[in-house]
Amino acid sequence: MSAHLTLIAAVSADGFISRGQGVPWDLPLDRAQYRAYTENKWLLIGRRTYEEMLGWFKLGHHPLVLTRARQISPEAAISPQVVYSISQALLIAQNQPELVCCGGAEIYAAAMPYAQRLVITHVHEFLGSGLPFPPISLREWEPVTRKSHVTDADHAFAFDIVTYQRIRQLDLAA
């Protein structure tokens, strides 16, 4: 059995997840959706993103921190497990129904070939530069659900939350 790998991210209209640190948007509905989707799941996360998210993890989360470092600062309530590759993370989570990749940019790029699902919040704002999310080719990915949100008093930017399924698996042996 193998864990189903899902990438979850908020991405600007020009393909960036951040200007270099943190999430550049305050979108309460997206944040609630992110928390609900990742609740009680195994998470694959890069070291810098993990450190930015300290205090966010709850009991039930099982963070696998992908890093080149041998040690990381664990959060008091949740002890992460260090991994050194996507394949190692998938092996560790093999008995789980899903492993959710939460970034950052390098981790998304490394994990994209292994993913079966994407949960992407397409934010209707241009960042101009920053840390990119891998391109989503409609030859490889099919949108299966879409929830659209307009701007309002709590959301400065409109956004769409789109779930994609992989149409065909990439040949990782090539």
Image (cartoon, helix red, strand yellow):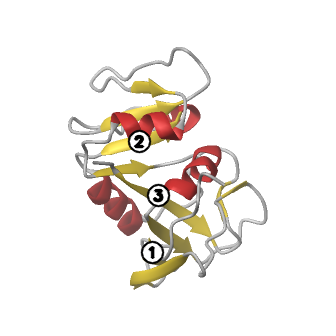
Calculate the distance from the C-alpha at mark 2 to the C-alpha at mark 1. 20 Å
Calculate the distance from the C-alpha at mark 3 to the C-alpha at mark 2. 13 Å
Left or right, 164 with reference to 78: right
Q: Position of residue 12 (x, y in %)?
A: 63, 69
Say if 4 sits above or below 152 in the image: above
Q: Describe the element under mark 3 as helix, strand or loop.
A: strand
Say if 147 sits above or below 154 in the image: below
Residue 133 visible: yes
Left or right, 166 with reference to 75: right
Left or right, 102 with reference to 13: left
How dense is the environment of label 2, judged by Cα within 10 Å: few (below 14), some, or many (20 and up)?
many
Determine the residue positioned at 60% across, 51% down: 173
**In the image as oriented, which residue stretches furthest toward the right?**
128
Say if 68 sits above or below 144 in the image: above
Q: Which mark is residue 90?
A: 2
N-terminal-most mark, 3 or 2 = 3
Q: Which mark is residue 85?
A: none
Who is closer to the viewer here, 63 or 86?
86
Determine the residue positioned at 21% across, 39% down: 60
Determine the residue positioned at 46% across, 33% down: 88
Q: Are marks 2 and 1 in contact (CB under 8 Å)?
A: no
Left or right, 47 with reference to 37: right
Q: Describe the element under mark 2 as helix, strand or loop.
A: helix
Q: Point out the frontmost of discs 2 and 1.
A: 2
Q: Which amino acid is tagged 1?
A: Tyr
Q: Which amino acid is tagged 2?
A: Leu
Return the residue at label 1: 164
Q: Point out the frontmost of discs 3 and 2.
A: 2
N-terminal-most mark, 2 or 1 = 2
Q: Which mark is residue 7?
A: 3
Calculate the distance from the C-alpha at mark 3 to the C-alpha at mark 1. 10 Å
